[in-house]
Structure formats: C-alpha cells, structure tokens
Amino acid sequence: MTNTTSDKIVKKPNKRLRTGLMIMYFGLGINLFGFASLGDFFEGLGLLVLALGVGMVTAGYIYPNTGEEITEAVEKFEEN
C-alpha cells in the first residue's frame, strides 16, 4: 500500500481570505446592531463594511497567495 498523503499539495492559509471573512462578519454585526437599535446610518455603514469583506474574500479566492504559486502559474503559461 502506498502513502497518498505525501502526493497532495498542502496550501498555506490565505491571509486575505481570513481577513475578509472577519471584516464581513464585523460588517454584519454593525448592520444588525443598527437594525436593532441605532438606525439607518449604522445599517448602511454595516452594509458598506460587509461589502468590503466580500471583496476581500473574492480577492482571496481569485489571486494566488504565495510567490511559488505565481511562479508556477507563469511557468505553465510559458509552456503553452
């Protein structure tokens, strides 16, 4: 029997993705807090912060997170 776990590529955690999720939930909290007690200004502010978090999460999924991945992508492109 062979060990297949050594063949897998282990990705490091993506800091952009983690930060985006934290910002997203912070914006959601501001939004809900404004909805519950403070009013429209905090609802809008929470939605703005939430949208920034969504953008960071999207960037975390789209862009490579290490220099090695960028180098690998460039080498694959140059082969074609």
Image: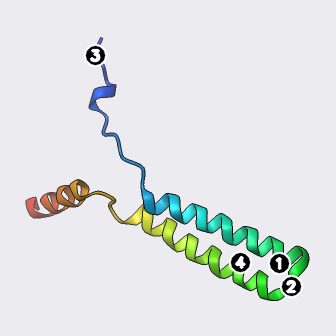
Query: On the image, which quarter does residue 68 sit in?
Result: bottom left
N-terminal label among 2 and 3: 3
N-terminal label among 2 and 1: 1
Above or below 78: residue 13: above
Q: Are marks 3 and 1 in contact (CB under 8 Å)?
A: no
Q: Are marks 2 and 1 in contact (CB under 8 Å)?
A: yes
Observer-side mark, 2 or 3, equals 2
| Residue at 34% across, 26% down | 5
- Give me the disc on residue 34: 1
Element type at marker 4? helix
| Horizontal arrangement in the rendering, residue 8 relative to residue 53 (left or right) | left
Observer-side mark, 3 or 4, equals 4
| Residue at 70% across, 83% down | 45
| Horizontal arrangement in the rendering, residue 68 relative to residue 24 (left or right) | left
Who is closer to the viewer here, 30 or 9?
Answer: 30
Element type at marker 1? helix
| C-alpha span from label 3 to label 1 | 56 Å
| Residue at 56% across, 70% down | 54
Residue 65 position in % (x across, y down): 34, 59
Query: On the image, which quarter does residue 52 sit in?
Result: bottom right
Residue linked to disc 3: 2
10 Å crowding of disc 1: few (<14), some (14-19), many (20+):
some
- Give me the disc on residue 46: 4
Q: Hey, what amino acid is under mark 4?
A: Gly
N-terminal label among 4 and 2: 2
10 Å crowding of disc 4: few (<14), some (14-19), many (20+):
many
| C-alpha span from label 2 to label 1 | 5 Å
Residue linked to disc 2: 39
| C-alpha span from label 4 to label 2 | 11 Å
Residue 78 position in % (x across, y down): 10, 63
- Specify the farthest residue to the right: 37
Q: Are marks 1 and 4 in contact (CB under 8 Å)?
A: yes
